[in-house]
Image (tube, rainbow, N blue to C red):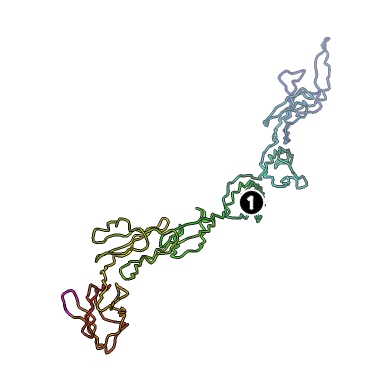
């Protein structure tokens, strides 16, 4: 006989057997006689069993076959041999699968970090599965992104341009260049270069200037000829190479004198125009005096305005003393040049013996005198200040007088 935990005696209800063994009891039968019962007793006890589980994703419990997906403690109870309960305690730990994602920069190719034998050559989304620390699957998503960069720039340069990659371009246009491993990811950078090259242009011009010419570049010239200049752009490029053919007009304003005729030194210059002026009348134009020569009819101060093309210049005012001709016994005296600087030539048609030359100022004072035993053509060199003087030549009882102007 099997009983759970204890067994009550058949003959004595107050007697309880709690241990397994063989027992004998007497029980009166129906006729009043004793009946002996032999009891082979087995006492069973309730049982408790603890089971531990640690698996990925889910666990199948022993005994019931129940599948659980969450960690925890699960209890199952069964009626066992002898009617005692059998309790199973399931201590379950569910190990979880994991997932992760990562971005990978792609230049030409990139190796899978979790499997170096896998090479990614195109941008896209890729997957890999590895075992995590718990021994479960770890699902990894790789976002493969191209790390190559592109850009566009506008470039202005002089004559030629050397690209970042070392190429040299000599014409304007749109070019493409590759900067190998040059961006922040050490990948190639592709650049579109819109190139504008400033090349020097040749230019020429002709200039006519009076006395001098100053070019746009600051060169000053006083004689005719060609000059060459290079003009810079805002970038410092040689943008224009210019040839300037310069014609300098220098007007000769000197006045010469032939007896009582004033002669412009520009006489004979092609295209020159003349206008004589009266200095004592505030440079008033003298009517009809428009040739290179002006024959004065009396003392005065005269100047000449000379026009050559677009250039106009005026001479200094010249003091003019009208020179008369002394005719005594047919003898004439000439003095030239007149005006002069104190150096002049006296010409006589006949020689004079025992002659003297005196120069007298306007106050009547003799400022210079020289004696000659014989005189016809005589050069005089007198240290005179500017002004008007009278020259007297005396000899053989004759006197000749003429006025001079010293400048």
Front in this rendered view, residue 104 or 356: 356
Front in this rendered view, residue 118 or 303: 303
Quadrant location of the N terminus?
Answer: top right
- Which residue is drawn at the image coordinates 20% and 78% (left, top)? 360
Category of crowding for the residue at label 1, using alpha-carbon neighbours closer than 10 angstroms: few (below 14), some (14–19), many (at least 20) = some
> Looking at the picture, does residue 157 appear above or below residue 88?
below
Q: How many marks?
A: 1
Front in this rendered view, residue 46 or 328: 328
Disc 1 target residue: 171
| Main secondary-structure element of the magenta-colored stretch | loop
Front in this rendered view, residue 203 or 259: 259
* Outermost residue to the front: 329
The part of the chain drawn in magenta is: 361-365
> Looking at the picture, does residue 80 appear above or below residue 286?
above
- Which residue is drawn at the image coordinates 58% and 46% (left, top)? 154
- Which residue is drawn at the image coordinates 68% and 37% (left, top)? 99
Quadrant location of the C terminus?
Answer: bottom left
Q: Position of residue 5 (x, y in %)?
A: 73, 25
Quadrant of the image occupied by residue 128: top right
Quadrant of the image occupied by residue 400: bottom left
> Looking at the picture, does residue 293 appear above or below residue 70?
below
Q: Position of residue 256 (x, y in %)?
A: 35, 69
Quadrant of the image occupied by residue 365: bottom left
Element marked by disc 1? loop
Magenta region includes residue 363: yes
Q: Position of residue 233 (x, y in %)?
A: 51, 53
In the picture, measured across the screen, residue 103 lies left or right of residue 43, that is left
In the picture, measured across the screen, residue 169 lies left or right of residue 274, that is right
* Outermost residue to the bottom: 373
Q: Position of residue 247 (x, y in %)?
A: 47, 61
């Amino acid at each position: 006989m099997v009983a759970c935990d204890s067994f009550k005696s058949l003959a004595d209800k107050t007697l309880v057997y709690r241990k397994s063994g063989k027992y004998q009891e007497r029980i009166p039968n129906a006729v009043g006689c004793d009946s002996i019962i032999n009891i082979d007793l087995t006492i069973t006890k309730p049982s408790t069993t603890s089971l531990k589980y640690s698996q990925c994703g889910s666990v199948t419990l022993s005994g019931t076959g129940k599948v659980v997906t969450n960690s925890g403690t699960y209890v199952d109870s069964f009626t066992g041999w002898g009617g005692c309960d059998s309790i199973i305690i399931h201590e379950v730990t569910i190990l979880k699968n994991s997932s992760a994602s990562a971005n990978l920069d792609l230049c030409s190719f990139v190796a899978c970090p979790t499997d170096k034998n896998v090479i990614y050559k195109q941008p896209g989304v890729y997957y890999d599965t590895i075992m995590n620390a718990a021994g479960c699957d770890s699902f990894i998503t790789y976002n493969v992104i191209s790390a190559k960069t592109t850009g566009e720039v506008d470039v202005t340069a002089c004559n030629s341009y050397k690209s970042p990659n070392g190429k040299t371009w000599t014409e304007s246009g749109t070019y493409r260049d590759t900067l190998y491993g040059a961006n922040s990811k050490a990948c190639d950078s592709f650049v579109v270069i819109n190139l504008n090259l400033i090349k020097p242009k040749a230019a020429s011009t002709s200039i006519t200037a009076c006395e001098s010419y100053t070019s746009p570049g600051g060169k000053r010239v006083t004689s005719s000829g060609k000059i060459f200049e290079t003009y810079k752009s805002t970038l410092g490029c040689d943008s224009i190479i210019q040839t300037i053919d310069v014609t300098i007009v220098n007007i000769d304003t000197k006045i010469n004198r032939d007896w009582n005729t004033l002669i412009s030194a520009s006489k004979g210059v092609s295209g020159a125009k003349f206008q004589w002026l009266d200095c004592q009348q505030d440079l008033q134009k003298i009517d009809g005096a428009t040739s290179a020569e002006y024959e004065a009819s009396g003392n005065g101060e005269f100047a000449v305005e000379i026009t050559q093309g677009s250039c106009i210049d005026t001479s200094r005012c010249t003091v003019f003393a009208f020179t008369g001709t002394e005719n005594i016994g047919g003898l004439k005296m000439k003095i030239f040049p007149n005006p002069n600087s104190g150096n002049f030539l006296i010409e006589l048609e006949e020689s004079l013996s025992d002659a003297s030359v005196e120069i007298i100022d306007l106050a009547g004072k003799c400022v210079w005198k020289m004696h000659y035993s014989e005189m016809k053509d005589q050069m005089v060199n007198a240290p005179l200040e500017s002004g008007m003087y009278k020259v007297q030549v005396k000899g053989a009882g004759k006197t000749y007088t003429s006025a001079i102007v010293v400048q």
